[in-house]
Image (cartoon, coloured by chain):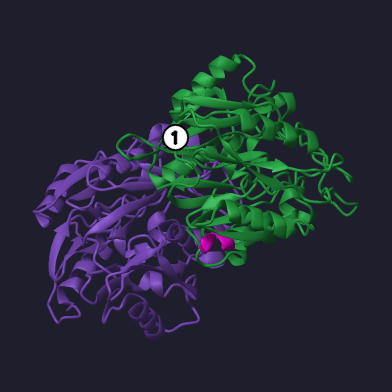
Chain colours: A green, B purple
Amino acid sequence: MPGEYEPQEKIWMIWPERPDNWRDGAKPAQKAYADVARAISAFEPVTMLVSAAQYANARAQLPDEVRVVEMSTDDAWCRDCGPTFLTNDKGAVRAVDWEFNAWGGLVDGCYFPWANDNAVARKICEIEGVDSYHTPGFVLEGGSIHVDGEGTLLTTEMCLLSAGRNPHMTKGEIEEQLKEYLNVDKVIWLKDGIDPGETNGHIDDVACFVRPGEVACIWTDDPADPFYEPARAACAALSEATDAKGRRLKVHKLCLPKKPVTLGADFAIDSVEGSLPRREGDVCIASYMNFLIVNGGVIVPQYGDENDSLALAQVQAMFPDRKAVGVYTREIVYGGGNIHCITQQQVK
Amino acid sequence: MPGEYEPQEKIWMIWPERPDNWRDGAKPAQKAYADVARAISAFEPVTMLVSAAQYANARAQLPDEVRVVEMSTDDAWCRDCGPTFLTNDKGAVRAVDWEFNAWGGLVDGCYFPWANDNAVARKICEIEGVDSYHTPGFVLEGGSIHVDGEGTLLTTEMCLLSAGRNPHMTKGEIEEQLKEYLNVDKVIWLKDGIDPGETNGHIDDVACFVRPGEVACIWTDDPADPFYEPARAACAALSEATDAKGRRLKVHKLCLPKKPVTLGADFAIDSVEGSLPRREGDVCIASYMNFLIVNGGVIVPQYGDENDSLALAQVQAMFPDRKAVGVYTREIVYGGGNIHCITQQQVK
C-alpha cells in the first residue's frame, strides 16, 4: 500500500444525502462536499458516486470536471467503505475490499443496514477494472489506518480492538491480517483516537504520515480541550515509536480548533430507528488532521475557527512541495467526519 | 457516426429484471443476456449495467471478463436508451444523448415512467469521460437508425413519423436533425418496420448496412409469414435506393424464422398498470436481422427454428472477414427485441 503522498490517479467521493445524519436535507453538506471536490479537482480528477435520486442534483451542483457516477450507498464516507488501493510487485494496481459494518455493526455501529456501503469497494474496482480482494470475516475501515509506503502502518487499539470489529481475533491475529493484505512489516499501535462514540477512534483524526520517517499529530496546550488527553498521549507515543526501517519518527504538531465545534439548536435531522442519534450540544470531531494529500496539494479542513489559518500554515510547513488549500467544511464535521473521511485515493 | 462495422471500444448492455416484461422473474432472460455477453466478450469488452438490487446476482451470473456497473434503468434495451457514439473531425469520441420516451411516450409507449432510461446515455458518457449532446424535444432510439459511416442513414417512416415521437416536426425537419447530429447527407426512408405495436417499426429488425454500398434485408417467400409484406416492400425499396455517394445498394437477403415465434400459455409476467400487456398468442418480432456486428465477429440470434443454421450461414456469407456466432435468444424476443436491441457499441 503506497503512502498517501505517492502519485494518485484520482480521488473517489460519495455524495451526502441521508436526512438522519446531514441536517436540512443534506443541502449544506452537499455544498461543502462540492467545495471539497472542486478544490481537489484543481490537482487531480475526482469521481463522485451518487444515488439515482440525487444524480441530477449532484451533476448540477458539481463542476463539469468532476465525474459523476451512479451508485447506491448508505452514507457518504468513501475513506471507510471504499477500496484500499495497492500496487503489486509488477506495478499493477490492486485493491483490498474490506468487510464494512458501519463502524461497529450491531454492537455500536452508526446505522443499519450497511449492505450498500459494503458493496462500494467492489463496485468501484469493477468500474476501474481493478482486481480486488474481499476480506470476509475481517472488518476494517480505511480511516482506521495510515501507512508510510515503506512497511509501517499506524492505527489505534481503540478502533481495531473494539468489540464491533473483529472480537474473534487477537491483537496479533489482526496485525497479521494487516501485514498480509497491505504488505507492511510493522504496526504502530496508538492507544486511543478522539471519537470513541462514532468511529471508535480512527487514526485519521489523530495522526498521519507526512513522509517516510515523519508524522503529524494533533496537539493542544489547553487542558479544557475535549481532545487534550488523547492528543498528548498520541504525540508522546509517536515520539517514542520507531518505524519498519528502525527510524525514530519525527513528529510535527498540528493545532486543534480553539473552540470546540458542537451541534447547535438548529441541527435538524430526521429521526430514524437504527441510526445513531445526534443531539444539540454534541461535541463534533473537529480536527485539522483530517486533511487529504493529493498530487501537488493538501486539502485542509477549516471550521471558521480562530486557529484555521494557524492550522493551514502548519500543514503548509509540513509539505513545502505541495500547496495547502483550506476548505470550509464545518458542515461535514457535523455529520461525523471531514475531508479525509469523505475521500479515497486511487493510486497511480 | 461510424458504421457498426467500424472499430469498437466496447459494448454496453443492461441487465433485464422487470417482472412485467420478462417471464418468470426474468431468470430465463438473464441467462440469455449472459450468453450474449459471453459471446461478445470473445471479441471485445462488455460492460453490463445493473440495478443495485440485481448487482450481486448479475455479477455471479456473468463471466469475470464482463464489467458490471450499477445503474438504475427502467428496462434493458441499451440500443434504444444508450448513447449514439460518434467521432468528431479530430477523431475524438462524442455521443448523442437522444431524448427517450419508451417508444412513444404517453401516446403508445411500452411503459411509464421512463426517466431512468432517459438518463442512461448521459450516465454512460460520464463514466467514460465522453462529452455528449442531449436533444431535448427530439425523441429518437438507437434502434430506429442505421448508418453506413459514409453519409447515409437508413430508417423507417413508421417509427420516425409516429405520433409518439416528434409529431410537432415535419419529415423534413426530422431529417435535418438526423443530418445535423450524425453528420449524414442522405436519409433513406423505408415505409414500414415489422412491429407497429412495440417500437413502431425499428429498422434494426428489417435491414442494416453490411458495409458501405451494401445492405442486408429480411426476406421470405412464404405469404403466410406475418412479416411477408413489409419484408418484400423493404427489399424492393432498398433495391431502388441510392446512398449518399450515389451508389445503388447491393441487397443481401436474410431469411426469417420458418415458424413464427409466439408467446405460449406458460408466459407468466406481472400485471402492472402503465406497461404494455403481453398475452398468450402474441406474435414476437423474431428476426435474424437483429444481429450485432463486433470487432471480428457478428453475434446472431437463434430461435430454435428450422432456419437458424441457414440464417447463420447467410450472415456469415455477408461478413467473410468476421466470425458469425449464433446465440440462442428466444427468451429475449419474448421480451420484445433481440441482440441488436440490447446492445450499444462504443466506437474506438
Name the residue tied to disc 1: A150
Residue ID at (32%, 34%):
A89
For the residue pair A306 and A128, the one nearer the viewer reads as: A306
Of the 4 image quadrants, the one containing the N terminus of chain B is: bottom left
- Spot occupied by residue A144 in the image (x, y as percentages of width and height): 61, 34
Residues in magenta?
A38-42
For the residue pair B32 and A312, the one nearer the viewer reads as: A312
Query: In the figure, B237 relative to B304: above or below?
Result: below
Secondary structure mostly seen in the magenta stretch: helix
- Spot occupied by residue A133 in the image (x, y as percentages of width and height): 44, 30
Query: In the figure, A144 relative to B125: above or below?
Result: above
- Spot occupied by residue B272 in the image (x, y as percentages of width and height): 59, 47
Q: Amino acid at mark 1?
A: Glu
Residue ID at (71%, 57%):
A310
Query: In this image, A112 relative to B94: left or right?
Result: right
Helix, strand or loop under label 1: loop
Please check the rendered image and state whether residue A345 is part of the magenta-colored stretch, yes or no: no
Please check the rendered image and state whether residue A40 is part of the magenta-colored stretch, yes or no: yes
Residue ID at (63%, 50%):
A339
- Spot occupied by residue A195 in the image (x, y as percentages of width and height): 75, 35
Of the 4 image quadrants, the one containing the C terminus of chain B is: bottom left
Q: Which chain does the numbered disc 1 sit on?
A: A
**Quadrant of residue B9 in the image?**
bottom left
For the residue pair A304 and B264, the one nearer the viewer reads as: A304
Residue A89 seen in the figure: yes
Query: In this image, A58 relative to A275: left or right?
Result: left
Residue pushed farthest right? Answer: A265
Count of marks, rendered view: 1
Residue ID at (40%, 33%):
B61
